[in-house]
Image (cartoon, helix red, strand yellow):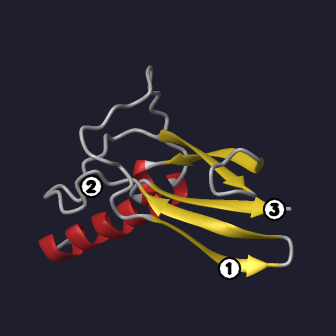
Amino acid sequence: MDISRRRLIGAAGVTGAALGLFSAGLSSGTAWAAPRYQDDPYRLGVASGDPAADGFVLWTRLAPDPLAVDSRGGMPERKVAVEWQVASDERFRQVVRHGRAWAVPELAHSVHAEVHG
């Protein structure tokens, strides 16, 4: 069976995309210490949305260098824990919800934390 270069590259792309979707969120990398960034990893901001009577979604993408040539935003090729809090006051003295989410390289280190209650 003859396989053209174009067909081979196309098949590799489809296989790679399928593996990427299959493994999303399953990064096996372990961070031995809390990562330190020279620049603010929240340069793209933090947003909230999808409001409901019992909660909403917090969204961010960690990217200390959003325009990095490697498209990783200046992030390492491993998962990073993101702690989040919601408070009933501006100074965060009364935290009403908190949690941890993982920013994984397979999802460009984006985080979607669903806050309930």
Q: Secondary structure at mark 2?
A: loop
Spot occupied by residue 73 in the image (x, y as percentages of width and height): 27, 55
Q: Quadrant of the C terminus?
A: bottom right
Proximity of marks 2 and 1: CB atoms separated by less than 8 Å? no
- Corner quadrant of residue 8: bottom left
* Residue highlighted by disc 2: 73
| Residue in view at x 40 percent, y 65 percent | 17
Spot occupied by residue 111 in the image (x, y as percentages of width and height): 53, 57
* Residue highlighted by disc 3: 116
Three-letter code, disc 2: Gly
Q: Secondary structure at mark 3?
A: strand
Q: Earlier in the sequence, mark 3 or mark 2?
A: 2
Q: Tell me the crowding category of disc 3: few under 14, some 14 to 19, or many 20 or more residues within 10 angstroms, Cα based.
A: few
Q: Secondary structure at mark 1?
A: strand
| Residue in view at x 25 percent, y 60 percent | 66
- How far apart in space, not on screen, are marks 2 and 1 (Cα)? 26 Å
Q: Nearer the viewer, residue 108 or 57?
A: 57
Q: Is residue 27 above or below residue 45?
A: above
Q: Earlier in the sequence, mark 2 or mark 1?
A: 1
Q: Is residue 3 above or below residue 94?
A: below
Q: Earlier in the sequence, mark 3 or mark 1?
A: 1
Q: Tell me the crowding category of disc 2: few under 14, some 14 to 19, or many 20 or more residues within 10 angstroms, Cα based.
A: some
Residue at the top extreme of this rendering: 32
Judge left or right: residue 62 versus residue 3: right
For residue 1, say whether it is visible. Answer: no
| Tag shown at residue 60 | none
Q: Nearer the viewer, residue 87 or 98?
A: 87
| Residue in view at x 18 percent, y 63 percent | 67
Q: Quadrant of the N terminus?
A: bottom left
Q: Is residue 86 above or below residue 35?
A: below
Spot occupied by residue 74 in the image (x, y as percentages of width and height): 24, 48
Between marks 2 and 1 in the image, the one whose residue lies nearer the viewer? 1
